[in-house]
């Protein structure tokens, strides 16, 4: 797997597929490449201890709408989620090691620099997802671990 060299938000998957042609043995495999398009970027803003998630949601919407100019309101989504503790961040967690976050989803085609977002805000303490690539995002979503078979449908 690798990020597509010229298409933002796309990635390439290389592997083997069973051949539909008679090459010799009925189970012969041939090399293949698949382009996965429209992988979305995800950012997570972690709620500060003692603050209200609605205040965080309003703050995040304001920040993102200033940084990303969007023509259509459905191009960017905002969602309240609970995530397992992100060990690389010093954030406030509950007893079960969960953090309350606002998840922001939008296209990798939208330009957003990591430096454009402050690590801390009035209602959030910590931010992650700014450095994730389309490939990393897909690996996390599909929980891929090591070499293995990937089922591809609707290709």
Image (cartoon, helix red, strand yellow):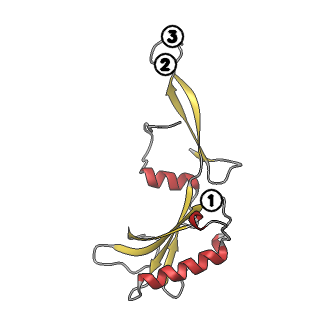
Which residue is tagged 2? Answer: 28
Q: Is residue 98 visible?
A: yes
**x and y percentages locating residue 53 in the rendered image:** 42, 81
Q: Residues within 10 Å of mark 1 (few under 14, many from 20)?
A: some
Spot occupied by residue 55 in the image (x, y as percentages of width and height): 47, 85
Q: Is residue 96 above or below residue 4?
A: below
Q: Is residue 135 above or below residue 47?
A: above
The mark that comes first in sequence, 3 or 1, is: 3
Residue pointed to by mark 3 = 24
Q: Which label belongs to residue 16? A: none
Residue 67: image location, x then y, percent: 66, 75
Check disc 1 and report the residue beneath it.
108
**Residue 131 quadrant:** bottom right
Give the camera-side residue of 32 and 68: 68
Q: How many marks?
A: 3
Which residue appears at 45% of the width and 54% of the height? 141
Q: Are marks 3 and 2 in contact (CB under 8 Å)?
A: yes
């Amino acid at each position: 797997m690798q990020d597509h060299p010229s298409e933002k938000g796309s990635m390439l998957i290389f592997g083997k597929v069973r051949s539909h042609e008679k090459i010799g043995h009925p189970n012969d495999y041939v090399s293949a490449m698949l382009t996965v398009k429209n992988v979305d970027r995800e950012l997570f803003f972690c709620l500060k201890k003692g603050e209200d998630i609605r205040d965080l949601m309003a703050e995040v919407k304001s920040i993102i709408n200033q940084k990303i100019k969007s023509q259509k309101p459905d191009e960017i989504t905002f969602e309240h989620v609970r995530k397992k503790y992100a060990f690389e961040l010093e954030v406030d967690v509950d007893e079960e090691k969960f953090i309350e976050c606002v998840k922001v989803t939008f296209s990798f085609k939208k330009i957003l620099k990591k430096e454009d977002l402050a690590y801390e805000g009035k209602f959030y303490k910590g931010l992650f997802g700014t450095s994730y690539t389309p490939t990393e995002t897909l690996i996390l979503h599909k929980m891929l671990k090591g070499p293995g078979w990937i089922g591809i449908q609707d290709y």
